[in-house]
């Protein structure tokens, strides 16, 4: 990857198929060698990995602005963009469990008099076309305000399963 001073439409069209121009984190113009897709015949594992990657890319359009903003905040100061982290979580989950990681579509922090509750809307997808997608609502156990005030800051909240596998959900930073 190399930083580029100026990208014109003419340069992009002239080098299409050889050089990939894009904005790193939407700010810095960069160029890299055009990615090469493996040639068929694919192994069963390659084909499945490509299907998971396609599902990860297709799920971007379903994320709420609230979740996208949380992903962006979490990627500040990191070398990988939020989209790369999002894809890597889904691909890593697939590699370990041979399934699609549940995807957080939206979240809401509900503050009551003495407690906080984080409500998540989660999308469950499957590689098997016959299994329909499912959108479920999950909420955290009650978080007592008194406990949060005593805890060292900052506090981050995300989603995962009992085995410690992270789901495709950003870290939500609790701000006082």
Image: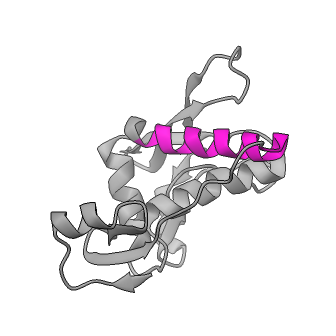
Where in the figure is residue 109, as x and y percent of width and height?
40, 47
Choose top left, top right, bottom left or bottom right for residue 3. Answer: bottom left
How many numbered discs sit on the rendered protein? 0
Q: Is residue 56 magenta?
A: yes
- Which segment did they paint magenta? 42-60
Residue 171 showing in the rendered view: no
Where in the figure is residue 100, as x and y percent of width and height?
68, 40
Q: Is residue 136 magenta?
A: no
Magenta: predominant secondary structure element? helix
* Nearer the observer, 21 or 160: 21
Choose top left, top right, bottom left or bottom right for residue 41. Answer: top right
Quarter of the image with the C terminus is bottom left
Residue 64 showing in the rendered view: yes
Residue 148, relative to residue 31: is it above or below?
above
Q: Say left or right for 118 vs 131.
A: left
Quarter of the image with the N terminus is bottom left
Q: Residue visible at 77% across and 44% down?
A: 42
* Nearer the observer, 136 or 41: 41
């Amino acid at each position: 990857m190399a930083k580029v001073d100026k990208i014109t439409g003419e340069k992009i069209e002239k080098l299409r198929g050889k050089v990939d121009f894009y904005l790193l984190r939407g700010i810095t113009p960069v160029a890299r060698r055009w990615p090469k897709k493996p040639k068929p015949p694919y192994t069963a594992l390659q084909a499945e990995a490509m299907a998971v990657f396609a599902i990860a890319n297709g799920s971007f359009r379903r994320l709420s602005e609230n979740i996208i903003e949380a992903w962006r905040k979490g990627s500040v100061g990191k070398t990988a963009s939020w989209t790369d982290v999002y894809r890597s979580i889904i691909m890593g989950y697939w590699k370990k469990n041979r399934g699609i990681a549940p995807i957080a579509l939206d979240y809401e922090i509900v503050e009551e008099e003495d407690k906080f509750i984080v409500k998540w809307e989660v999308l469950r997808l499957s590689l098997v076309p016959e299994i329909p997608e499912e959108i479920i609502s999950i909420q955290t156990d009650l978080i007592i305000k008194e406990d949060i005030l005593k805890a060292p800051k900052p506090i981050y909240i995300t989603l995962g399963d009992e085995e410690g596998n992270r789901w495709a959900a950003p870290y939500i930073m609790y701000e006082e």
